[in-house]
């Protein structure tokens, strides 16, 4: 069976590079679902994963690329989430894992509903597996990918809550931030404090900032998530209350600038 599947998957890789069509990502997603845990297929699936994600990352280098090809982004990150569920032993240690985290950060604020949801689901799946008992063996690899990107990722998530994404994406963004907080606790509080401090008091008062950080701290300690959900909804409403405020907030957080770093005062 492995040899037969291997021949087919080699052809999929060739065709995907030639045509750049998401149908090959979808087909691969179905293959992963069926054969992901089959040891006889492991080497073929590993090659498939690295080839498909490596090529897709080359196609999705800017937010404009995501906007132009939301179908590609959607199927790419659906495939990534399926890899986490069915063959994490192949996917997480792969050479492409960190690059795919970068790719997800570039596209996280894409306005297309399905593509955005797939990206956010992938991120929450990464943080969830890092935080579960069965994911202990993956934790060092995920830490290596996330810790150096955590401040930027947190800034993107807060910007998304504050208007970079439509309010209809609030539930998905909230869950990603919660999953990140549960996995990295005090580090996320540090990253969130850096990001929230960028927003001028004309847009977000000190009291509102403190409430957000205190609720996030409680979530990191394992408290009921309803309080966090309520606080994030309030933060979202405040930062979207009019066009001028929303522009101030987005100008401060700069979610599309992955190289922007916060300079501590």
Image (cartoon, helix red, strand yellow):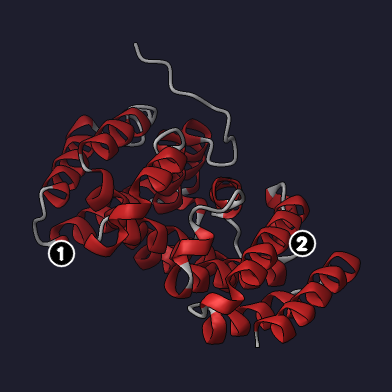
Q: Secondary structure at mark 1?
A: helix
Q: Nearer the viewer, residue 57 or 3?
A: 3
Q: Is residue 28 left or right of residue 15?
A: left
Residue holding disc 2: 68
- Expressed as whole percent of the image width and height from the top left, the position of residue 6 reads 72, 77
Q: Residues within 10 Å of mark 2 (few under 14, many from 20)?
A: some
Q: CA distance from mark 1 to mark 2?
A: 36 Å
Locate residue 179: give its quadrant: bottom left
Label 1 with label 2: CB-CB less than 8 Å = no
Residue holding disc 1: 226
The residue positioned 39% from the left and 27% from the top of the image is 198
Q: Nearer the viewer, residue 198 or 175?
A: 175
Q: Quadrant of the C terminus?
A: top left
Q: Secondary structure at mark 2?
A: helix
Q: Quadrant of the N terminus?
A: bottom right
Residue 174 visible from this viewpoint: no
Which of pointers 1 and 2 lies earlier in the amino acid sequence?
2
The residue positioned 39% from the left and 65% from the top of the image is 172
Q: Is residue 237 left or right of residue 2?
A: left
Q: Nearer the viewer, residue 39 or 192?
A: 39
Q: Nearer the viewer, residue 243 or 53?
A: 53
The residue positioned 77% from the left and 82% from the top of the image is 8
- Expressed as whole percent of the image width and height from the top left, the position of residue 86 reads 46, 75
Q: Residues within 10 Å of mark 1 (few under 14, many from 20)?
A: few
Position of residue 139 relative to residue 66, above or below, is above
């Amino acid at each position: 069976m492995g040899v037969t599947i291997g021949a087919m998957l080699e052809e999929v890789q060739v065709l995907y590079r030639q045509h750049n069509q998401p149908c090959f990502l979808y087909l691969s997603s179905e293959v992963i679902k069926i054969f992901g845990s089959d040891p006889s297929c492991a080497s073929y699936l590993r090659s498939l994963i690295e080839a498909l994600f490596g090529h897709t990352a080359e196609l999705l280098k800017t937010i404009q690329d995501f906007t132009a090809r939301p179908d590609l982004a959607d199927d790419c990150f659906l495939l990534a989430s399926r890899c986490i569920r069915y063959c994490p032993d192949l996917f997480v240690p792969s050479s492409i894992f960190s690059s795919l985290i970068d790719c997800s950060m570039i596209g996280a604020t894409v306005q297309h509903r399905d593509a955005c949801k797939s990206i956010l689901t992938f991120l929450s799946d990464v943080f969830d597996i890092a935080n579960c008992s069965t994911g202990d063996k993956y934790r060092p690899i995920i830490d290596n990918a996330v810790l150096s990107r955590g401040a930027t990722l947190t800034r993107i998530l807060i910007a998304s809550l504050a208007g970079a994404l439509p309010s209809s994406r609030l539930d998905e963004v909230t869950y990603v931030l919660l999953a990140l907080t549960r996995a990295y606790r005090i580090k996320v509080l540090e990253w969130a404090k850096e990001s929230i401090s960028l927003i001028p008091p004309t847009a977000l008062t000190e009291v509102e900032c403190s409430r957000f950080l205190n609720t996030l701290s409680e979530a990191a300690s394992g408290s009921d998530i309803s309080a966090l959900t309520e606080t994030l909804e309030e933060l979202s409403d405040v930062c979207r209350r009019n066009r001028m405020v929303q522009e101030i907030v987005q100008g401060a957080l700069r979610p599309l600038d992955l190289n922007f770093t916060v300079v501590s005062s």
